[in-house]
Image (cartoon, grey):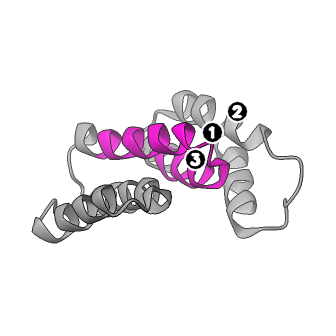
Amino acid sequence: IAGAADQEVLAFVATSGDGLCEADCHRVRGELLVRHDAPDAEIEACFRTAVDLARRQQAKLPELKTTTAWARSLGRHGRVDEARALLEPVYGWFTEGFDTADLMEAKILLEKLA
């Protein structure tokens, strides 16, 4: 799945100076790898890169979206405690916006992981 097109997109984002969407590109790539049953190590590398980028940029929403996707993947593989430990602190940062789709999705997932 890690074809030339997604590598080209990541290279473009990295060199364009618009780093704001770089974390999202890695998250989306990770989600696509999940859908194609790629090896866990490859999936987690994408999610880890996305989280690291979001943290460096102090971009809380991209970090939430990535940790939600990553936690969902971990939960599907029976790694429930790890998934919850990953998502809970990120969800806990938010003090408003709980009616937004991203926060509602994270809350539902946390409830399923409980």
Residue nearer the viewer, 14 or 104: 14
Mark 3 or mark 2, which is nearer the start of the sequence? 3
Which residue is depicted at the point 63% across and 39% down? 87
Residue at the far left: name it. Answer: 4
Q: Quadrant of residue 92?
A: top right
Kindly state the secondary structure of the residue where label 1 is placed.
helix
Kindly state the secondary structure of the residue where label 3 is placed.
helix
Which residue is depicted at the point 70% across and 32% down? 89
Q: Mark 1 — residue? A: 87
Which quadrant of the rendered structure holds the C terminus?
top right
Task: Find the distance from the CA under tag 1 to the CA under tag 2.
Answer: 6 Å
- Does the stretch in magenta take in 59? yes
Residue at the far front: name it. Answer: 17
Range drawn in magenta: 43-70
Task: Find the distance from the CA under tag 2 to the CA under tag 3.
Answer: 11 Å
On the image, the x and y values in percent for residue 6 come to 22, 66
Q: Mark 2 — residue? A: 89
**Relative to 102, does residue 73 appear above or below in the rendering?**
above
Which three-letter amino acid code belongs to the residue tagged 2?
Answer: Pro
Q: Mark 3 — residue? A: 63
Contact check, label 2 and label 3, Cβ < 8 Å: no
On the image, the x and y values in percent for residue 35 come to 31, 63
Which three-letter amino acid code belongs to the residue tagged 3?
Answer: Glu
- Does the stretch in magenta take in 101? no
On the image, the x and y values in percent for residue 24 come to 45, 59
Contact check, label 1 and label 2, Cβ < 8 Å: yes
**Disc 1 packing (10 Å; few <14; some 14–19; many ≥20):** many
Q: Is 51 placed left or right of 12 in the picture? A: right
Kindly state the secondary structure of the residue where label 2 is placed.
helix
**Disc 2 packing (10 Å; few <14; some 14–19; many ≥20):** few
Q: Is 8 placed left or right of 101 in the picture? A: left
